Amino acid sequence: MASLAELAAEAAACTACRLASGRTTVVFGTGSPTAELVLVGEGPGAEEDRQGLPFVGRSGQLLDRLLAEELGLSRDSVYICNVTKCRPPNNRDPLPDEIAACRHFLDGQLACIAPRVVVTLGNFATRTLLERAEGISHLRGQSYPFGGARLVPTFHPAAALRGGPTVVAQMRADLVRAKRELAAGAPAPA
Ligand code: URA
């Protein structure tokens, strides 16, 4: 199995889909390689493409705040990545063939890190990993088996920024669910 570093090096040189031609940087992922919690977004935005790091724009600031407030976790103690590692032009949705071309990187990241809980942020990450066609409003509110882990779908933070307090509250509730899942699988204290 390829290591995270090997996968990152492969991604940095990847030209498997049309997104390669428009990118500034490949946004592979960031955080702890032994994280118990992995968060998966859609694809890099403009700021992420510039910095080479996921969720560093406005959505990322909200995500960082909710992680700290609901889980007491910093971005360094979790792992954050996206379904596509290159920015779709003008922030359009990633296309099915782009998601398929990038899929082995996400699968490889999850295999290397082997988290106990995966939080999917929005429709693309949720549909991709759950292999379901329904939208996030329908799929959120519960957790799902995901290999040896649990998958907790929630809204994309950009949707929470657009949707206001009601959507933010739902996102908070989903993160509390993720916290419960982390606690449920933890070894009993000695
Ligand atoms: N939106 C995403 O889905 N991912 C990012 O990294 C930034 C914004």
Image (cartoon, rainbow, N blue to C red):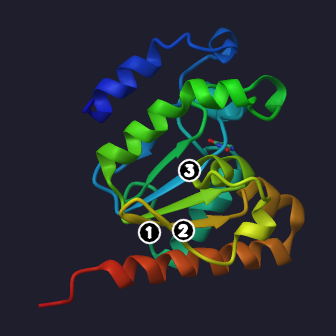
Asked if 64 appears above or below 9 in the picture, the reply is below
Which residue corresponds to mark 2? Answer: 67
Residue 135 pos. (x, y %): 79, 59
Asked if 15 appears above or below 10 in the picture, the reply is above
Taking the spot 77% from the left edge, 53% from the top edge, the residue there is: 158
Q: Earlier in the sequence, mark 3 or mark 1?
A: 3
Which residue corresponds to mark 1? Answer: 73
What is the three-letter code of the residue carrying label 2?
A: Leu
Ligand 1 positioned in quadrant? top right
Q: Earlier in the sequence, mark 3 or mark 2?
A: 3
Q: Which mark is residue 40?
A: 3
**Cβ–Cβ below 8 Å for labels 2 and 1?**
yes
Choose mark 3 or mark 2, whichever is in front.
Answer: 3
Q: Earlier in the sequence, mark 2 or mark 1?
A: 2
Quadrant of image for the C terminus = bottom left
What is the three-letter code of the residue carrying label 1?
A: Leu
Could you classify mark 2 by the number of other residues whose Cα lies within 10 Å: few (under 14), some (14-19), or many (20 or more)? some
| Residue 84 seen from this side | yes
- Answer with the quarter of the image where residue 47 lies: top right
| Residue 87 seen from this side | no
Task: Depth check: give the residue in front, 138 or 51.
Answer: 138
Taking the spot 78% from the left edge, 59% from the top edge, the residue there is: 134
In the picture as drawn, the residue positioned furthest to the left comes out as 190
Residue 106 pos. (x, y %): 48, 39
Q: Alpha-carbon distance for marks 3 and 2? A: 13 Å
> Taking 138 as reference, is 14 left or right?
left
Could you classify mark 3 by the number of other residues whose Cα lies within 10 Å: few (under 14), some (14-19), or many (20 or more)? many
Secondary-structure class at tag 1: loop
Residue 177 pos. (x, y %): 55, 80
